[in-house]
Amino acid sequence: MAYKISDSCVACGTCIDECPVEAISAGDIYVIDPDKCIECGACAGVCPSEAISLE
């Protein structure tokens, strides 16, 4: 089960730098590629808007 970014995302970019497998793509709302996500939780731990959670 991969992590997912909700509509609460403010596109701050903090999560991108934390992802060890580069599974996060930038945009209006960031997106996590479920095929690349290793479920480490690093992104969720740094998200200031708490927009990242397990699906």
Image (cartoon, helix red, strand yellow):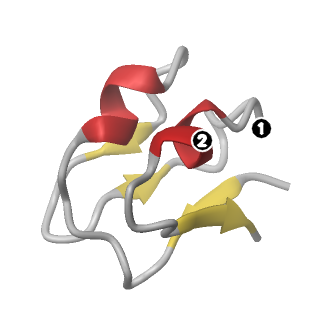
Residue sitting farthest toward the bottom: 7
x and y percent of residue 50 in the render? Answer: 51, 66
Query: Mark 2 = which residue?
Result: 45
Residue in the foreground of this view, choosing between 43 and 34: 43
Question: Residue at horizontal 67%, vertical 55%?
Answer: 3
Question: Residue at horizontal 48%, vertical 78%?
Answer: 6
Q: Seen in the image, is 19 located left or right of residue 1?
A: left
Query: Mark 1 = which residue?
Result: 39
Q: Secondary structure at mark 1?
A: loop
Residue in the foreground of this view, choosing between 37 and 48: 48
Q: Seen in the image, is 22 located left or right of residue 10?
A: right
Pointer 2 with pointer 1, Cβ within 8 A = no
Residue type marked 1: Glu
x and y percent of residue 7 in the render? Answer: 38, 84
Image position of 36 with respect to 18: above or below = below
Image position of 54 with respect to 22: above or below = below
Labels 2, 1: front one: 2
What is the quadrant of the N terminus in the image?
bottom right
